[in-house]
Amino acid sequence: MAKMSAINKNNRRIKLSNKLYEKRSKLKKIIMDKKLSLEERFKAQQKLSKLPRNSAKVRVMNRCQITGRPHGVYRKLKISRIALRQLGLEGKIPGMVKSSW
């Protein structure tokens, strides 16, 4: 099990990035628009830099929903490889059986 502080920090980042997603995307569109004047783009860049760093989607870590493990996480399932194996062994995932040869 991962440290609760790391899990909570990541959850805060997720909430903040979802909250400010629209604002960040609008500012980024203004910054990337070459038709606008340099001053307008610069002001948008300054506004973007004043937003909290943790509001960026890049700073969110993919963590297992069950254990909080940061590595070996399947994006589609949102669980780690270890938790997936454990659930498969318990028979909680339909169609998944333990492989043996």
Image (cartoon, rainbow, N blue to C red):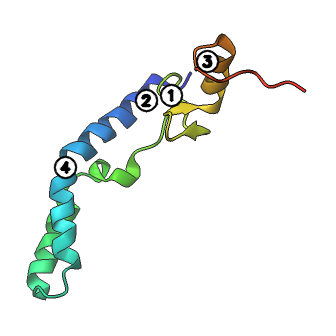
For label 1, the residue is 68
Amino acid at the residue labelled 4: Leu
Label disc, if present, on residue 7 of the rendered structure: 2
Q: What element carries label 1?
A: loop
Q: Is mark 3 on a helix, strand or loop?
A: helix
* Lower position in the chain sequence, tag 1 or tag 4: 4
Query: Disc 1, disc 2: CB below 8 Å?
Result: yes
Most extreme residue toward the top, as rendered? Answer: 90
For label 4, the residue is 20
For label 3, the residue is 87
Q: What element carries label 2?
A: helix
20 left or right of 91 in image: left
Measure the C-alpha gap from mark 1 to mark 4. Answer: 24 Å
* Lower position in the chain sequence, tag 1 or tag 3: 1
Point 43% across, 29% down: residue: 7
* Lower position in the chain sequence, tag 4 or tag 2: 2
Q: Which of the two discs, 1 and 3, sits closer to the camera?
A: 3
Amino acid at the residue labelled 1: Gly
75 left or right of 15 in image: right
Of the 4 image quadrants, the one containing the N terminus is top right
